[in-house]
Amino acid sequence: MTDTEKTTSHLTRRQALMLMGAAGATGLMGPMAIGRDRAFAANADPSGQLVLAFSQEPTVFNPLMPHIEVDEGVYYAVYDPLFDFDPSGEFFAILAADVPTVANGGISADGLNWALTLKEGVTWHDGTPFTAEDVKFSLELTMDPEFRSFRSTGYKLMKNITVVSDTELTWEMAEPFAPMAAILASTYIIPKHVFDGVADKNDSPLNTAPIGTGPFKFKNRMAGDHIELEANADYHMDGPYLKTLIIKYVPDLNVMYTQFKSGDIDVIGLQYITPDHLAEAETLEGKVVKISGQATFESIGLNTTRPQFQELAVRQALYAAIDKTSIIDALYYGVPTPTETYMPQQSYYYNPDLPKHEFNIDKANALLDEAGWVRGADGIREKDGVKLAFSNSTTAGNHLREQAQQFIQQTFLEIGVAMEIKNLPPAVMWGDYWMNSEFDSVVVGLNTLAGADPDTSDYFMSTASPVLGGAGQNTFAYNSAKVDELLTKGALSFVPEDRKAIYQEMQAVIRDDLPFLPMFQYSVIKGWKDDVTGPAPNVNNRIDSWNVRDWKRS
Amino acid sequence: MLRYILSRLGQSLILLLIVSFIGFAVLTLAPGGPLSQFALSPGMTQEQIDKITEQMGLNRPLWVQYIDWFTHMITGDWGTSYRDGQPVLHVIGSHLFATLLLMGTATTLSVSIGSSIGILSAIRRGSLFDTTMTVAAMIALSIPTFWFGLIAIYIFSLNLGWLPAGNMYNIGDQSVLDYLRHLILPASVLALVDVAIWSRYMRTSTLNVIHQDFVRTARAKGLSSRRVLLKHIVGNSLVPMITLAGLQVPMVLGGALVTETVFTWPGMGRLFLDSLGYSDYPVVMGLLMASALLVLIGNLAADLLIAQIDPRVRLD
Amino acid sequence: MTSAPLTSPARRPVIQSRALRRFLSHRLALIGVIMVLSLTLACFIGPHLLPYDELHIDLRARFAPPGTGGHIFGTDPLGRDIAARLFHAGQISMAVGFAVMIIATAFGSVVGVISGYYGGRVSAVLMRIVDAFLSFPSVFLLLALAAFIQPSPVMIALIISATSWMEVARIVEAEVKSLRNQDFVQAAHMLGLSGRWIMFRELLPNAIGPIIVAASLTVARAILLEAYISFLGYGIQPPLPSWGNMLNGAQQYLASAPWLAIVPGVAITIAVTGFNFIGDGLRDAFDSRSGGR
């Protein structure tokens, strides 16, 4: 990990963020050179075994198919993207020889023509050489109509992907699209030759025996229990330093913690140590326990098409009636950080000057009184035949959230608002109920960003709301002309300073409008044995193993 | 005999048909769906989900999906898991061992302990032992299995630290001893209810045998009570137990599911819950069919065995 | 469906006083009755005696161990009084248990009596359906149903009933089959009474003994099943307490606050044991062959 920090620290943030820059920024930037190729350092022999535990089971091994967070835990070990985000939000090259920029000629000044150079001498786990054909294949597969692709955003703008040589390819963009680089950073490249003669690309050998260029080779999988990976001796970067990496599935967080305590687990991954165990965990001998921020934020999302939520005063009153501090300090043991926005505080684009939330029942009552919401016989407020009563849903079985819901329910009652808890099994909750905004309100943890890029059009653009007739993830049905305008402007701009201003303004607008009541930015409690080095927080990647190539045991 | 087997098989097939229909209707009529798990993934849009829904044929009318699934099922193609893209039979097969190991151990435990208690109770009918065991069995039948598991974990793992709180083995160890250590708690918890049931049935069965003529005859012939006990009573009272074993299959399977959830045992019960959570219908259907099949086979095998052993039973 | 087989005025003395006498002399059964009665009383009177409301949240009093601060059973992660919650949960869990008993027994009796009375093809079809339901492990079926419905106490009672009616159906069918050709039924036929009358006024009351036994065991089973699905989070949803959902989440605090798991579990065990004892007593009372104990 330290490797990355050293090599990128000489770059200013401006330089790094502008490496995608097109708008007249040529000449300012030096090439992104991260000296991490094998040529520079001979690998020590990989040794030792490490058990990394997740509380969900990775099951999808073709990274271009729909998958969940935990699956990426395996991808980072087995596959490589072209380049990736480091913890400070800067790119470093992996399969690419260098990250394309305007300065190095990788991107044309108008942002429409891209040229990519790949590393030489990289091979797949089965010995086949890795070439530009594989990259072209991967990028095109995402738009194959017969293929169940995990996303189309960005890819659908790519045209004329052309292989120039084994290590060079070019493509054109239908329009300039600033978040494209972030999308490429989460695109794992898969081997074309494995698909030779495969009729149904959804059913390729990758599903059972993934082959990548990554630091670890897939050895075997005990379904329902663990996946065994072994060191790729021919890896093209530094590392790996571990001979065997075991990714273990432990479905229960208490059992996971117990096993971490007893030493059966070396690194505790996704879903991590539960907050109630924090105090004890910090006293464990021989373990490192660290709290680290995540890009996900927790909020009470409102379905803004509901009559109850039409008035700003109501939304403000509800927000004022949430005892955030108690929820965070008592229920979550002070682990997460209170927030006013969707943007993680580690981000370059984070707006620190948003109005601070204040828990104030009197103020909330006053707001509602003023707006003409009158308490009825049952103590619940009403106005123009609309009762201030609504349901709140989340995934059934999430204990901490259920506790928070019940606590909020009580404070809402104090301001004459009846919130009914209506939790649903995950498959129901996140199906049409969520997608088509059939809920009144939800408690949800969302990561609206793609890596370090600030674009959130999918979540806040009015055209991204299925219930308003659009397509996207704007399930709060948030409809703000100002935000639409800012989002459009931001996606077309390639200058980080300009974008920063745009997105900070947008955070302020959303904070004032309150389509969701922001609660806190997630922090998780990670833990590993003290002889393990390497695990490092990275708010720009969804999962711990993003730098598993660097992990060692001493 | 052959005719009997064939007609039983025929009936079983009709049963399976009904079972599959009920199961399929329940699953597919419910809201949500296998793609909802991706709803919170970055970049996933409704457009994309609709496209995939169509590719997977999930937008077809229910009866079309059912007939499609059913015709494939009877030819041995149980579909592909939505989660990991593997054939359903393979997915179930890879979880089968863990469940059979747990069920097998628990059943062995409960049959041996339960039968012994039952026989002793019957012989000493009305004694303090008999009464105690009767009450104990009823209490055991009343304890929620999952709760008993929690308490066992609390005592033996968390407080005493003698046994692991979950999983089937430690990676890297995987010796027989390691498996045993992990097996003790879940198998004992699962066996508790069965011990109670077996002891009850064995008691009744033994009582019936004791009063039969051949036992009296044996006694009259002057055989020692121990020999009478071992040879005649135990042998004969075990016969109805075979039917019981067959009928117990769904119970033990259900119990295994409960136990697996508490002890994070990587078996079919765990798989069932995970698959339900992800709406992985093919696997859920597969598990329902597999368990129904197990139950039917258990019953049939029990009937056939009885006919082999007990001359009083005729099947035709 | 509420043909009320349990309440219809029977012509013959249905519950013979001999059975009642036997039941009353059955020691376990009496213990069972006492257990169930005292638990029921506690659940309905207890909340009025406690100083705390079951929904009142007090984050400063979280995880108070039993006996501290006036909380006899301690408090939960939100600082709510567990005793108050336990009693309210008991009302709900037992209500679900009784609802299941009524629904499952009524439905099972109707299926059983129809199948037994008509016999032949009707019986074959109905009994195959019974077999089909029996060949699912009920937990599988229950979870498959529970995972996809809106969990309310009524729905929970309905889906538990859906997995609990088969036993009654089988018992009633067997009983009715054996009664079908007896004199009083033939006489009823000759009097020109309708099939429905014969089924529900003549045959069913005669099967009342086994039905009552099965019903008492159904309550016990239903309480266990509710506890399990609520434990997994698919059952009754908070803030409404049930014994099962009080256990949901208790696993997480097993090391630090074990009373969260112990208290509701003991309540469940007492209730279920009580009903099982009663069922056992009833069985002995109605079974003319057994001489009692």
Image: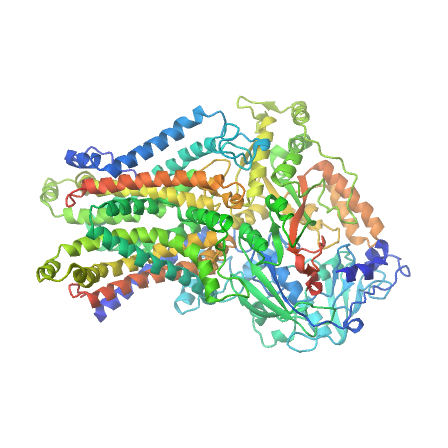
Q: Is residue C5 visible?
A: no
Q: Quadrant of the C terminus of chain A?
A: bottom right
Residue C292, horizontal then vertical, whole percent: 18, 42
- Determine whether, in the image, residue C174 is placed left or right of residue B69: left
Residue B60, horizontal then vertical, whole percent: 49, 58
Q: How many numbered marks are there?
A: 0
**Nearer to the camera, A343 or C229:** C229
Quarter where residue B289 is shown = bottom left
Outermost residue toward the top in this view: A377
- Determine whether, in the image, residue C173 is placed left or right of residue B19: left
Quarter where residue A216 is shown = bottom right
Quarter where residue A113 is shown = bottom right
- Above or below residue C192? Residue B212 is below
Residue plotted at (36% across, 33% down): C39
**Nearer to the camera, C130 or A521:** A521
Q: How is the image coloured?
A: rainbow
**Nearer to the camera, B41 or A405:** A405
Residue plotted at (23% across, 71% down): B2
- Determine whether, in the image, residue C209 is placed left or right of residue A531: left
Q: Quadrant of the N terminus of chain A?
A: bottom right
Residue A91, horizontal then vertical, whole percent: 78, 60
Q: Is residue A28 visible?
A: yes
Residue A193, horizontal then vertical, whole percent: 64, 76
